[in-house]
C-alpha cells in the first residue's frame, strides 16, 4: 500500500513540475523584449511610425525613401 502511495505521489509531482515548466515557457518569450519600439515622426509629412520601419538621416526620420529624398518639409 505504501508503495502505491509513493508512486501516485511521484507521478503527481512529475505532472505538476511538467505543467509548471510548460507555463513558464509560454510566459517568457513575451516578457523578453530587447528594446521597446518608439514612435517617430516623418520630417516630411508628419506621419508617426515605429522606429524599426522608419528611415533615418541625421536626426530626422522619414516614412519612405521618397520622403527621405525630398527632405524635410519647409515651414511657411
Image (spheres, rainbow, N blue to C red):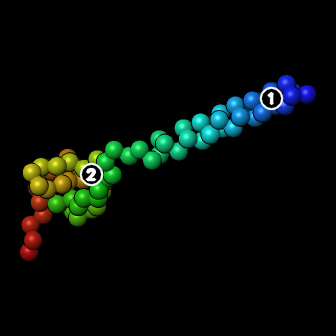
Above or below for 30 versus 44: above
Above or below for 12 versus 37: above
- Rendered location of residue 50, percent (x, y): 31, 54
Q: Residue at x 23, y 64 (%)?
A: 46
- Rendered location of residue 48, percent (x, y): 28, 61
For residue 51, side relative to residue 2 (left or right):
left
Q: Residue at x 32, y 52 (%)?
A: 37
**Tag of residue 54:** none
Marks 1 and 2, how far apart at CA: 57 Å
Q: Residue furthest front?
A: 2
**Tag of residue 51:** 2
Q: Residue furthest bottom?
A: 76
Specify few, some or many for label 2: CA neighbours under 10 Å numbering under 14, 14-19, or 20 or more. some
Near-viewer residue (8 or 39): 8
Query: Element at badge 2?
Result: loop
Specify few, some or many for label 1: CA neighbours under 10 Å numbering under 14, 14-19, or 20 or more. few
* Labelled pair 1, 2 in contact (Cβ < 8 Å): no
- Rendered location of residue 47, percent (x, y): 27, 62
Q: Residue at x 62, y 40 (%)?
A: 20
Assign the C terminus to one quadrant of the image: bottom left
Residue 13 in which image quadrant? top right
Q: Residue furthest top?
A: 3
**Tag of residue 6:** 1
Amino acid at each position: 500500500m505504501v508503495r502505491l502511495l509513493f508512486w501516485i505521489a511521484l507521478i503527481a509531482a512529475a505532472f505538476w513540475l511538467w505543467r509548471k515548466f510548460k507555463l513558464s515557457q509560454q510566459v517568457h518569450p513575451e516578457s523578453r523584449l530587447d528594446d521597446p519600439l518608439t514612435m517617430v515622426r516623418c520630417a516630411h509629412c508628419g506621419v508617426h511610425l515605429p522606429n524599426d520601419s522608419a528611415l533615418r538621416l541625421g536626426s530626422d526620420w522619414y516614412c519612405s525613401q521618397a520622403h527621405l529624398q525630398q527632405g524635410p518639409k519647409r515651414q511657411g
